[in-house]
Amino acid sequence: MSSKTLNVRKHVNEAEERIRKYIRETPLEYSHYLSKKGRCQVYLKLENLQCSGSFKARGAFNMILSLPRKTKVITASSGNHGLAVAYALNTLGGTGTIYLPTTTTSVKTDQLHNYNVQLEFFGTDCAETEVFARNIAKQEGGVFISPYNDPLIIGGQGTIAIELCKYLTEIDVVLTSVGGGGLISGIAGYLKELNPNIEIIGCLPENSALMYESVQAGKIVRREIKPTLSDGTAGGIEPGAITFELCQKYIDHFIIVNEGEIAEAIKYMLEYHHMVVEGAAGVTVASFLKEFKRFIGKTVVLIICGGNIGYQQLKEIVCEKKYK
């Protein structure tokens, strides 16, 4: 399906009906500190409290619930999508195989071992792992569940926007982290249909800013990425991904942050909101802190996309041993 013919709002509404009883309506928390700093109204959408620890549960449930029972499911993931698929399969009584890059953090692989799924490792880059897993699905007659490149995944992630509209009558700006683009495509595709004036800001780590670079180049680019705290957004973009054109269409502005800024944002969330968030969520907070002066007088939503971070990594951030 081409992004030009994709009715994102329709897919989001259908996903809402399909997945509501299986997911959490996550809190929308007002941030006094960020609001004061930016002289605006800042709300945090706490998807770190979602089932499986990230927003990915929304898309995973939407996709799996749309399949016939006992369908052979295969997917690829740097961690959060895999956790969401594993959680959804166990909840719904299914099984599947999850392919992960060899660079996947131990905290995420350890969590996956708690579920009745088969784990396989291939490649060092998410895009490489996805291509391999998709080919395996074709060979074995299974269904490949993309982490982002599917209307059902996009629709599921976009249900966040329905929850935002339930509590906020006016939204000026939404910031969210961007990897493959499924999350921002779903949220933006829904909100922009309601109000084209809502500003959508994509937030990316400097070490893996491929969607930004692709949009700038007018085509999907490929290059080697550097390690980043935002492992949930790291990796390449699949050739022909529908999310690329959706990001071209819907994202109004990009903010790029470095590893030190991400680490400071993670510490901020721990200190001021008493919450543990992962690097990809830190990217969004860091982006606001980097350009807070542009939000004066506005109602701003930050999507806190996940909380799956390892103890050792968190310890290094808090103790300032790395990421300066």
Image (cartoon, rainbow, N blue to C red):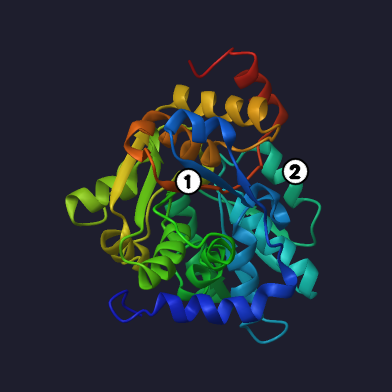
Choose mark 2 or mark 1, whichever is in front. 1
Name the spot of residue 265 as percent of width and height, x first.
Answer: 53, 29
Name the spot of residue 88 as percent of width and height, x first.
Answer: 72, 67
Which residue lies most toward the left here? 217
Quadrant containing the N terminus is: bottom left
- Left or right: 266 with respect to 206? right
The mark that comes first in sequence, 2 or 1, is 2
In the image, residue 54 sits, relative to residue 265, either above or below, namely below
Label for residue 233?
1
Name the spot of residue 34 as percent of width and height, x first.
Answer: 51, 33
Tell me if residue 288 can be seen.
Answer: yes
In the image, residue 156 sits, relative to residue 282, either above or below, namely below
Which residue, given by chain and number where applicable, does mark 2 sit on?
A: 110
Amino acid, disc 2: Asp
At 54% across and 50% down in the image, what residue appears? 122
Q: Quadrant of residue 249?
A: bottom left
Dot 2 falls on a residue whose secondary structure is helix
Q: Quadrant of residue 250?
A: bottom left
Front-lying residue, 82 or 309: 309
At 64% across and 75% down in the image, what residue appears? 64
Amino acid, disc 1: Thr
In the image, residue 68 sits, relative to residue 290, either above or below, namely below
Front-lying residue, 100 or 230: 230
